[in-house]
């Protein structure tokens, strides 16, 4: 089996296992009449994802324990299928999966994942995809029943066949073994929500004034999503969109208390999931805007786990002038946000920082934040090199030149009113007659001078 050089001769191996190969590609293969496959052409292929597929195979059968050439054949065939997928040779990938499927008892997850990859390719005709999916589904329905239903529904959605996708989910959600499966319950509730939302929007657009009650449609969607929430262990998973629409449906029925409790419980179970805090924040802003302290705490928690989130900047709206700790907390969030390069390219955080510095007394704790950044913020945000092109050629200046004004205003608090960056920006703004920006810069300088 080995060549004189010690390397495996896959051509000879293929000859010795010719009977296996011939049997695999006859009428017993998944799709009748598939073209012949040049088997040994793909055995030695190495790809960047080969290790992933190797690990999947090892979970079922170790390569070190393989005694049959058929099993080694299987491994390299799987690698060949992956290569075909990466090079968009989808017809050949389908045919090679047909051969793999005859030995799927060893590698069921691999066959299923490869099949879904083939299904996801848009160029394959839908009729052939349907046949392929049915064959894979018949083989693997006892191993991955819910996943196969979800993937089939997703395929219909990609093809814009929403009615077929909904019918498939509806046909499974009330029968065993799917009726208690969180995946199916989540999708059933989601589809019902989509159809409910479409009807509500159409009614609002028509403005018919007939006041149709959608309580039945709402109740059906809530039933599935409520059952999802009651499923054991489901709160340990990430169900962002499903719990968000569940809360929306409860709010539509005026059950604001239950909706708020649902979102708060989701935050407690998903305490590092920033989407959970974001959903709760928007819900509170819409239905409980008077709960300012609670909303501020939600934003602070969001900023703790994701300081780059744009929603964190809304915390400036909830400063309590009677509680100086809220000013300190707001400054901390703004400075942390601007520590990130992409965030600093947005004018909004700079504008909010200037607003807080000029409207509130920050002298008590501002020094703490500046001390942490005095070594690197000036070079990071207030570099003179960034102004060279603007000064030379006005046509090259950024459309959001107002960022320069707000950054220059903040630079006053970092390096004093006479720093080179602020002075240069003031000259640029004055030369272009930007009165509003000049006023902002002057006001910030005056406030700084008064407080110092």
Image (cartoon, helix red, strand yellow):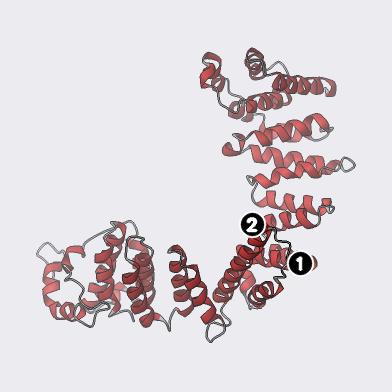
Question: At x 35% / y 59%, what residue is drawn?
Answer: 49
Q: Position of residue 298 (x, y in %)?
A: 75, 54
| Residue pictured at 70% horizontal, 62% vertical | 267
Relative to 184, does residue 378 appear above or below in the rendering?
above
Q: Which of marks 2 and 1 is nearer the N terminus?
A: 1
Mark 2 → mark 1, Cα distance in angstroms: 16 Å
Residue 284 vertical position relative to residue 425 in the rendered view, above or below:
below
Is any atom of residue 363 visible in this view?
no
Q: Is residue 68 among what the camera can see? A: yes
Q: What element carries label 1?
A: helix
Counting from the top left corner in percent of width and height, residue 21 is at 17, 77
Q: In this view, does 449 lie above or below 2?
A: above
User: Which residue is labeled 2 in the image?
Assistant: 275
Quarter holding residue 233: bottom right
> Which residue lies under the disc numbered 1?
261
Taking depth in this image into account, of 212 and 77 the one nearest to the observer is: 212
Q: Where is residue 336 in the image (x, y as percent from the top left)?
A: 67, 40
Q: Nearer the viewer, residue 203 or 291?
A: 203
Q: Which residue is drawn at 68% across and 58% down?
A: 204
Q: Is mark 2 on a helix, strand or loop?
A: helix
Compare residues 76 and 149 and report the one nearer the observer: 149
Q: Nearer the viewer, residue 391 or 188?
A: 188
């Amino acid at each position: 089996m080995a060549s004189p050089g010690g390397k495996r001769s896959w051509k000879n191996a293929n000859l010795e296992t010719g009977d296996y190969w011939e049997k695999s590609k006859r009428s017993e293969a998944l799709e009748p009449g598939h073209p012949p496959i040049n088997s040994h052409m793909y055995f030695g292929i190495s790809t960047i994802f080969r290790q992933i597929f190797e690990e999947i195979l090892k979970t079922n059968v170790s390569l070190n324990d393989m005694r049959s050439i058929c099993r080694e054949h299987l491994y390299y065939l799987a690698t060949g299928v992956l290569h075909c997928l990466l090079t968009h040779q989808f017809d050949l990938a389908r045919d090679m999966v047909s051969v793999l499927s005859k030995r799927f008892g060893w590698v069921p997850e691999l066959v299923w994942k490869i099949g879904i990859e083939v299904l996801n390719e848009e160029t394959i005709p839908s009729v052939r995809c349907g046949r392929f999916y049915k064959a894979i589904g018949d083989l693997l329905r006892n191993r991955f029943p819910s996943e196969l239903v979800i993937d089939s529904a997703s395929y219909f959605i990609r093809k814009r066949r929403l009615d077929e996708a909904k019918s498939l989910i509806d046909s499974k959600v009330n029968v065993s073994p799917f009726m208690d499966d969180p995946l199916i319950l989540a999708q059933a509730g989601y589809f019902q929500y989509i159809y409910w939302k479409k009807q509500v929007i159409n009614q609002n657009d028509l403005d018919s004034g007939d006041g149709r009650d959608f309580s039945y449609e709402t109740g059906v969607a809530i039933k599935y999503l409520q059952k999802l929430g009651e499923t054991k262990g489901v709160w340990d998973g990430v169900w962002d969109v499903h719990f968000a629409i569940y809360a929306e449906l409860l709010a539509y029925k005026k059950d604001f208390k239950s909706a708020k409790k649902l979102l708060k419980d989701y935050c407690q179970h998903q305490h590092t999931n920033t989407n959970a805090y974001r959903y709760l924040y928007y819900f509170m802003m819409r239905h409980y805007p008077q709960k300012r302290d609670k909303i501020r705490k939600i934003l602070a928690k969001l900023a703790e786990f994701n300081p780059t989130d744009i929603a964190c900047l809304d915390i400036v709206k909830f400063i309590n002038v009677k509680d100086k700790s809220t000013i300190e907390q707001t400054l901390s969030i703004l400075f942390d946000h601007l520590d990130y390069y992409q965030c600093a390219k947005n004018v909004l955080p700079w504008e909010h920082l200037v607003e807080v510095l000029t409207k509130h007394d920050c002298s008590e704790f501002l020094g703490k934040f500046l001390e942490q950044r005095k070594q690197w913020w000036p070079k990071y945000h207030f570099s003179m090199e960034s102004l060279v092109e603007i000064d030379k050629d006005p046509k090259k200046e950024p459309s959001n030149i107002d960022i320069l004004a707000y950054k220059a205003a903040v630079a006053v608090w970092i390096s004093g009113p006479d720093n080179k960056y602020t002075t240069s920006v003031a000259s640029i703004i004055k030369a272009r007659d930007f009165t509003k920006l000049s006023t902002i810069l002057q006001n910030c300088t005056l406030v700084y001078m008064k407080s110092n």
